[in-house]
């Protein structure tokens, strides 16, 4: 069979994929094999690959050189000869040696789970920061995998000065070029991060509190974002439909304003390259006043997905169980049968940090608003003002932005007692000149 090397591209609908799904005996924390297969098939659809077949491989012991045993490798080689897939996707992390040996033995392009996710991120990134982060992650991943099936990597070449000295192999040159590009990308990302930090500091000076949506990919974060903001962010039943962070202002029923942030979805075994590369973006979550963890409770494995998200948040420095900013939102209740719905309702019934919703239909939105408002109002303080009765604009502003606890009309003056956020208190004083007065 002639060697075939094709790029993964949305512009090439003829790209076909054969999926290899290892079932490792005794693996700690292993997911249900059906859930693993459904997810990897969804990932290949997300990159516009035509799925040919999924092969489940029982693995009693991982072979250091090729992952699979000789008999199973030959069985797959025969299948590749018959199906002629463009790409073979291995739903596990392969070492560079394993990947190279499988490519040579199967005479086909092989990518592992990490490589596939990187391809998806590369296609989806829209902002400058997103593209820089994806490229950095891809280069860090590729740096140790240059020994692949491309023959030019085996040549030696001469050269002068910056192109490499005599006898430098092409692979050494490629690694050096990659290292230089990685250094440049890190510098550019640091510059973007400083700009993001300035933006965050300017919001803190306004300041609006921030509410960050996090969750497993395809949990419905973007649908919820659209429901709460009235925006039209791309939301589809597709893994990693949203990659770049999106910010919108929202107003809660009590008049409190906040910034809502929708970030990239998480996934099990998220490549460490991506966690490191997207740390700057995910820092929006670290600094958020409220973290809304969106969970797709319509999935059989939603508890495993929840655990995956908790692990990544923990890696980012968030102590999940102790962090009182976190609200767990059990989404897609419209897709549950009566028994499963009752189970979820029991889960959330007596918790002030859990609620059940349907982002698609808007069910449960008020309960979520109440919980977000409760967290944000913890920083609220009481203030009392003596105001001119004729200053209707200032009075209307307080009724719009604060909770009025008491009001006493005293002829030309009004004494008004309110519960107000520090941000709105500062804005009111700056806009109208009234200073809080001490209670008599």
Image (cartoon, grey):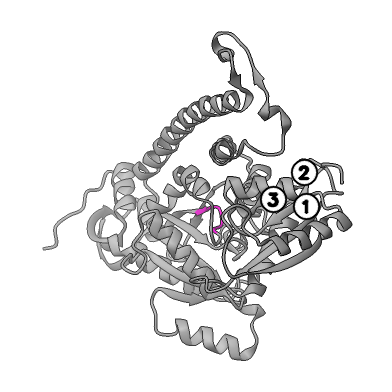
Q: Are marks 3 and 1 in contact (CB under 8 Å)?
A: no
How many angstroms separate mark 1 from mark 2 (CA)? 7 Å
Q: Is residue 55 left or right of residue 348?
A: right
Q: Which quadrant of the figure has residue 410? A: bottom left
The foreground one among 37 and 421 is: 37
The residue located at (88%, 57%) in the rendering is 82
For the point 59% across and 17% down, the residue is 167
The residue that disc 1 covers is: 48
User: Distance from label 3 to label 1 (Cα)?
Assistant: 24 Å
Vertical placement of residue 226 versus 159, above or below: below
Extreme residue in the left direction: 440
Give SS at disc 3: helix
Question: Which residues make up the magenta segment?
Answer: 261-266
**Residue placed under numbered mark 3 in the picture:** 102
Res. 19 image quadrant: bottom right
Local crowd at mark 1 within 10 Å, few (<14), some, or many (≥20)? Answer: many
Q: Identify the residue at image location x=55%, y=89%.
A: 342
Question: Mark on residue 9?
Answer: 2
At which x and y percent is residue 197?
40, 38
In depth, the one of 105 and 47 nearer the eye is: 105
* Magenta part, dominant SS: loop
């Amino acid at each position: 069979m002639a060697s075939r090397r094709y790029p993964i591209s949305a512009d090439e609908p003829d790209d076909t994929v054969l999926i290899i799904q290892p079932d490792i005996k005794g693996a700690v924390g292993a997911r249900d094999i059906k859930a693993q297969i459904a997810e990897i098939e969804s990932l290949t659809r997300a990159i516009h690959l035509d799925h040919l077949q999924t092969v489940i491989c029982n693995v009693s012991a991982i072979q250091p050189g090729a992952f699979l045993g000789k008999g199973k490798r030959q069985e797959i080689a025969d299948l590749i000869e018959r199906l002629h897939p463009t790409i073979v996707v291995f739903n596990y992390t392969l070492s560079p040696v394993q990947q190279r040996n499988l490519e040579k033995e199967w005479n086909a392009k092989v990518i592992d789970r990490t490589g596939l996710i990187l391809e998806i991120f590369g296609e989806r990134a829209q902002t400058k920061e997103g593209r820089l982060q994806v490229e950095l992650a891809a280069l860090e991943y590729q740096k140790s995998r240059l020994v692949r099936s491309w023959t030019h990597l085996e040549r030696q070449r001469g050269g002068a000065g910056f192109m490499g000295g005599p006898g430098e192999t092409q692979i050494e040159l490629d690694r050096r070029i990659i290292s230089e590009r990685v250094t440049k990308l890190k510098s550019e990302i640091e510059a973007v991060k400083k700009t993001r930090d300035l933006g965050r500091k300017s919001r803190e000076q306004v300041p609006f509190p921030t509410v960050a949506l996090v969750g497993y990919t395809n949990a419905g974060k973007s649908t919820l974002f659209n429901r709460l903001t009235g925006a039209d962010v791309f939301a589809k039943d597709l893994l990693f439909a949203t990659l770049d962070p999106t910010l919108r202002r929202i107003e809660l029923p009590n008049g409190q304003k906040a910034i809502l942030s929708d970030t990239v979805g998480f996934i099990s075994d998220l490549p460490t390259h991506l966690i490191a590369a997207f740390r700057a973006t995910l820092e929006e979550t670290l600094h958020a006043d409220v973290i809304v963890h969106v969970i797709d409770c319509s999935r059989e494995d939603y508890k495993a997905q929840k655990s995956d998200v908790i692990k990544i948040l923990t890696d980012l420095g968030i102590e999940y169980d102790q962090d009182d900013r976190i609200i767990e939102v059990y989404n897609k209740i419209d897709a549950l049968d009566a028994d499963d719905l009752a189970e979820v309702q029991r889960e959330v019934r007596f918790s002030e940090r859990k609620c059940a919703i349907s982002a698609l239909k808007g069910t449960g939105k008020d309960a979520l608003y109440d919980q977000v408002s409760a967290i944000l109002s913890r920083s609220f303080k009481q203030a009392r003002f003596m105001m001119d009765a004729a200053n209707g604009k200032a009075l209307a502003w307080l009724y719009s932005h604060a909770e009025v606890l008491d009001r006493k009309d005293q002829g030309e003056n009004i004494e008004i007692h309110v519960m107000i956020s520090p941000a709105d208190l500062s804005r009111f004083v700056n806009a109208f000149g009234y200073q809080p007065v001490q209670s008599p």
